[in-house]
Image (cartoon, helix red, strand yellow):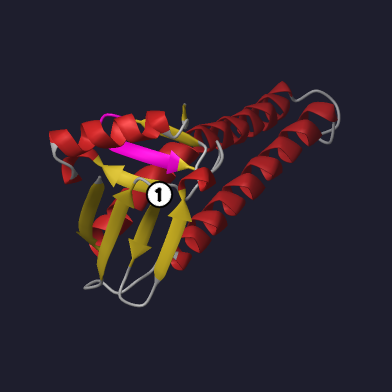
Amino acid sequence: MEIKIYRNADREMALKKIVWRSYTQRKLILIALIIIMGFAAVALAIASKVGNFWKFETCLGITTLAIGLLRLFDYLRNKSNYFGQLSCKADEKLEITINDNEIIYEAEDFRAIFQWHYYKFYSVTNELLLLKNNLNQLSPLIIAKSELSQKDLLELTLLLERKYLRRV
């Protein structure tokens, strides 16, 4: 069995954006909640107008707000680094070959060969199949279901089960 997938760099970048969004969605919600809690604590401390401004509630609110803003800055920096490392030529062609022994990922100036024991998990969404090395991996091998025929998708699913990859 051999499955070949051809795509251009724009398609690859679009798939990576989907993975980034799904990987960081919960983190972004958590950051927003931290910032909101910080604003709420500061607002309540200011509204109470009792005693000194620098009381426990104000300090707690400002500290929580600072932590939330630092986490937001870290999120934006990580996003910039992630997509900066993925940049490639827009007209570059990519080829993924999947067979019983290995997965070959080829670009015009790059070739990577992964043996099946490298991957330990896979997950299936409505539109994507992700092969992962560990559960929190941000750079899995992404295969869009639309890139495969029904026959190839079934063969690949059976191959994943034969290779003892755990579905998560």
Q: Pinpoint residue 110: horizontal percent, then vertical percent.
A: 39, 72
Check disc 1 and give the amino acid type. Answer: Asn
Q: Is disc 1 placed on a helix, strand or loop?
A: loop
Label 1 crowd bin: few (<14), some (14–19), many (20+), radius 10 Å:
few
Q: Which residues are magenta?
A: 125-131
Q: Pinpoint residue 74: horizontal percent, then vertical percent.
A: 61, 52
Q: Pinpoint residue 6: horizontal percent, then vertical percent.
A: 20, 58
Quadrant housing the N terminus: top left
Residue sitting at x 50%, y 32% = 26
Report whether residue 127 is seen: no
User: Is residue 12 depicted above or below 50 in this figure?
Assistant: below
Q: Is residue 167 left or right of residue 75?
A: left
- Residue in front for this viewpoint, 100 or 139: 100
Q: Pinpoint residue 68: horizontal percent, then vertical percent.
A: 64, 41
**Magenta span includes 119:** no
Residue sitting at x 26%, y 29% = 126
- Residue in front for this viewpoint, 63 or 91: 91
- Residue in front for this viewpoint, 77 or 45: 77
**Magenta span includes 126:** yes
Circle 1 sits on which residue? 101
- Number of marks in the rendered image: 1
Q: Is residue 76 left or right of residue 90?
A: right
Report whether residue 102 is seen: yes
Residue sitting at x 47%, y 66% = 85
